[in-house]
Image (spheres, grey):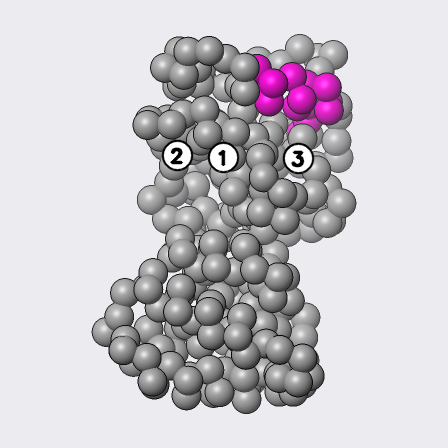
Amino acid sequence: MENLKVIRTSKQESLTREVELFKDEKQLAQNYINSEGFIFEEADLIPTNLKLDIEEINSKLNPKSDSESSIIIYESLKNLNLINASDKRLWTTLCHKQFMNYVQDRWPLKDTPRSIILSRWLFNGTDRTAFTRNAISRLWWAGHLTAEPWKKEPSLEFLKNDDPYKYTRIMTDVAQLWFDITEREWGGNLIYRICFLETFDRISKSKNVSATFLSRELSKIFTGVLVADVVLVAHKEPQALIEYVEELTSYLEI
């Protein structure tokens, strides 16, 4: 176990500027590929009370399975409060140092390395989406947004499952689900988010259809049905919302 030190805001900003202004993208990629972990000056670091077993976590992170990696990161940082979880410096440090090998393997620096570094190693875009793109923060937030929802919301008790990470696995196994949930306002609501994932799971098991196509179509339906009068009912009766959307999909050619 080691007490984690995170980079200061000034270092976070200078890393971002350096990537944005670096002229040669190929050389920029090589700088990240060849490094085994960035060495930061002590003056650039701030000590924290966070303790992590870095070696154990690295031994379990799987660049071929977002669901496995998400559960590992969330379990390791389960007690992280939302203020710390919203600190870009924490995730940038973990990407550039402790979990750099995982990030390199999961997000290879090819084609457009600058955009990959900015989104996966650092942060770009709005705060609402940036945390679900960064290579390590996205894993923690996936767990936070989906783990054991029946413990957080009594109306979701009917979905209780022996696997506390049922919805984490569903959400992280399909890239389109990440996009469709995090890019829409209703995705910020626990009930609608879990109802969406449950509906997706039910339909994907009963119909032979592309997961990407299904996620896109369902997101359109959810966006359409969550109007004022439906919202009031759906929030009280999430099971009714799931069944209602399932019924609507019967008219789709899927």
User: Label 3: how many residues lie within 10 Å, few (<14), some (14-19) or many (20+)?
Assistant: many
Q: Is 37 rendered above or below residue 62?
A: above
Give amino acid for label 2.
Trp
> Residue 158 versus residue 110: which sits nearer the camera?
110
Circles 1, 3 touching at the beta carbon (< 8 Å) = no
Residue 141 versus residue 247: which sits nearer the camera? Answer: 247
> Of 167 and 21, which appears nearest the observer?
21
Quadrant containing the C terminus is bottom left
In the image, residue 14 lies in the stretch drawn in magenta = yes
Residue 111 location (% of width, % of height): 32, 27
Say what amino acid the circle numbered 3 marks.
Lys
Q: Is residue 220 visible?
A: yes
Query: Which comes sooner in the sequence, label 1 or label 2?
Result: 2
Which region of the structure is painted magenta? 4-18
> Disc 1, disc 2: CB below 8 Å?
yes
Residue in view at x 73 percent, y 49 percent: 82
Amino acid type at image mark 1: Arg
The residue located at (37%, 48%) in the rendering is 65
Mark 3: which secondary structure?
Answer: helix
Q: Secondary structure at mark 2?
A: loop
Identify the residue under disc 3: 88
Q: CA distance from mark 1 to mark 3?
A: 12 Å
Q: Quick check: 46 left or right of 173?
A: right
Mark closest to the chain's N terminus, 1 or 3: 3
Q: Which residue is mark 2?
A: 107
Q: Is residue 248 left or right of residue 157?
A: left
Residue at which label 1 appears: 120
Quadrant showing the N terminus: top right
